[in-house]
Amino acid sequence: MKDQSTIVEILKAQFGDAIQGSDVFRAQLSVTVAPESIAELCRFCRDDARLGFDMLTDLTAVDFLPRQPRFQVVYNLYSFRDNDRLRLKVPVEENQTLPTVESVWRAANWLEREVYDLLGIVFEDHSDLRRILLWDGYVGHPLRKDFPLHGIPQKVVYR
């Protein structure tokens, strides 16, 4: 296992101000990353021999309404070689887009679609950004904190 402060030092040396902070909670390192740098940083985390985070285990998001920025997209990475985990957090304003990491990890395809479907966060240059859980005509994004508890009446068209 790598020393967590070493991981942060490597990332700061490569990305400078794009690393907005870091913290450790229950022995897991989290690094906050500027939105425009996430794709490049993920590729670096995968390809750099010192890091070797070769698996995207999960990609999700949290709505912190009324906090600004409203959303936080979370990337959970894993290194098979070192049995290490790294959490990357990206603050995202409402209506702000993020670059896709689909070219880094193919698994991001479905995970980014899920975040788009349930929270409405758009990933630039995604190969197939469309709803994955809800039907195409569904109005709204049900994991947003301002989504009504009883939902929005939907018009369902049966074919």
Image: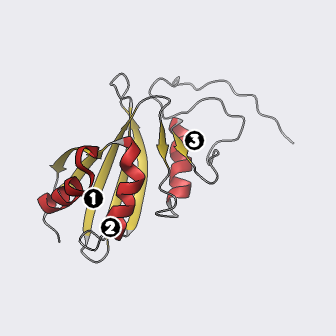
SS under mark 3 = helix
Q: How far from the left and from the top, in percent, is residue 90?
A: 35, 43
Q: Residues within 10 Å of mark 3 (few under 14, many from 20)?
A: many
Q: How far from the left and from the top, in percent, is residue 9?
A: 16, 57
The quarter of the rendered structure image containing the C terminus is top right
Most foreground residue, 57 or 38: 38
Q: How far from the left and from the top, in percent, is residue 35?
A: 38, 42
Sequence-wise, the earlier of marks 1 and 3 is 1
Q: Distance of mark 1 from mark 2, alpha carbons?
A: 8 Å
Residue depicted at 27% across the width and 52% down the height:
15
SS under mark 1 = strand
The residue to which callout 3 is attached is 117
Amino acid type, callout 2: Phe
The residue to which callout 2 is attached is 53
Residue extending farthest to the right is 159
Q: Distance of mark 2 from mark 3, alpha carbons?
A: 27 Å
The residue to which callout 1 is attached is 86
The quadrant where residue 137 appears: top right
Residue extending farthest to the bottom is 81
Amino acid type, callout 3: Asp
Mark whose residue sits in front, 2 or 3: 2
Amino acid type, callout 1: Leu
